[in-house]
Amino acid sequence: MLVVSPFEVLSIFLMSILAGLVGAVFGLGGGILIIPFLTLVEGVPVPYAVGASIVSVVATSSASAATYVQDRLTNLRLGMFLEVGTVLGAITGAFVAAFLAPRILLVLFGILLIYASTIMIVGRRVDFPSGVVPDRISRRLRLGGEYFDPATGATSRYEVTNTLRTLSISGISGIVSGLLGIGGGIIGVPTMNLLSKVPVKVASATSNFMIGVTAAASASVYFVRGDVQPLLVAPLMVGVVVGAAVGTRLLRRTPPLRVKLLFAILLVTVSVAMILKGFFPQIVL
Amino acid sequence: MDLNRIVAQSLRVGVLVSAVLSLLGLSLWALGGFGSVSVPVVLSVGVIFRLAFAGDLTGIVYLGVIVLIATPIFRVAISSIYFAAERDRAYAGITILVLGMLLLALYSGAAG
């Protein structure tokens, strides 16, 4: 049985506000912050940390997605199309998790993240190029869209391209999500932005939209397994909703290129941490 | 009705219900003097409902977790109904495929 003090519940609640905020702004679930906090600071056993985290990922993404969908920032069609890849990947990941050495996985994930950070930094000056030609699938499924950005005061029309490659990478991010108990937005956002040429704010909003579905599949597995502790998950479910409410307002006001730069910094930090953990498993990150 | 509004509302309701249930659970814990909390060995929707309506902390928080996990799945289901009603075959097919995979994951998760 897990003994939790009122002070621990309070600190988890306060930290989850930050996780919800970061998750809402960058299109992540926030698991990348919650898991290290629970294991390192609170000393929670890893399965319970992952179990609580994956449930709160569903809360962060659903709370922020509600606002972004209402604001018409989310590309619903693109999200629903790419979910075919993420959900298939998440289920595959959950099944093959038993046969893969976690260390190899972490190093591979770290390399993938460094690749994503590099292209994010190289492409940091342009949010989305004009004159993008949609491919056949994109035209057939009418994936392009438009959005209004309150930070720039402009409505922009964008096209979606490289559809099949983006779908395959969504599949890979789904696998990683199923294996590691995270939402996978950290791969999805740069992929949609740099490969499919979707504006970064739309990519973030659409990622939040997709993550809820991916994480719900994994969360149910952890829940049935008994890894979701009520006193860990309750403060998280409340805190991330508060954080997401602040985060969605913050994204509305932030210029897109600043979102990209901050995302790149976050990416580099996470990839270094992942690779370190892969090489030195005794460090709990 | 517009799909954006249906999706946004269903997500919002699901998240708020789970947050309120979590707060209720935490309040009960505080009223009970911050004691240790037990988790039932056998988890089923029936057990959780029974515990929740008996005013048990774990039951109430778990009911919130169930509502939360069901929220995005409900969102996919309602989208597929919307696309089917709009006779948008491609997207009705896509959403039904995703829904099928999710239900399969739920079923295998519950079975394993």
Image (spheres, rainbow, N blue to C red):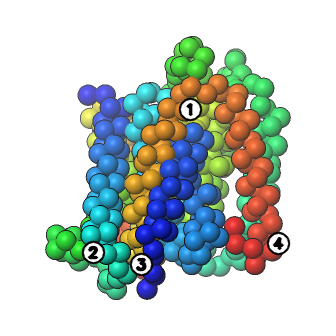
The amino acid at mark 1 is: Leu
Q: Are marks 1 and 3 on the same chain?
A: yes
| Location of the C terminus of chain B (image quadrant) | bottom left
Find residue A251 and name its label.
Answer: 1
10 Å crowding of disc 3: few (<14), some (14-19), many (20+): some
The amino acid at mark 4 is: Phe
Find residue A71 and name its label.
Answer: none
Q: Nearer the viewer, mark 2 or mark 4?
A: 2
Write the residue at 35% across / 44% down: B11
| Location of the N terminus of chain B (image quadrant) | top left
Write the residue at 71% across / 38% down: A262
**Numbered disc 1: what chain?**
A
* Quadrant hosting residue A72: top left
Q: CA distance from mark 1 to mark 3?
A: 36 Å
Q: CA distance from mark 4 to mark 1?
A: 35 Å
In this rendering, is residue A273 above or below B84? Answer: below
Q: Which residue is mark 4?
A: A279
Write the residue at 80% across / 37% down: A121
Q: Which residue is mark 3?
A: A226
Q: CA distance from mark 2 to mark 4?
A: 45 Å
Q: CA distance from mark 2 to mark 3?
A: 23 Å
Q: Position of residue B64 (x, y in %)?
A: 31, 61
The answer to whether B9 appears left or right of A126 in the picture is left
Q: Position of residue A151 (x, y in %)?
A: 58, 20
The amino acid at mark 2 is: Gly
**Secondary structure under badge 2?**
loop
The amino acid at mark 3 is: Gly
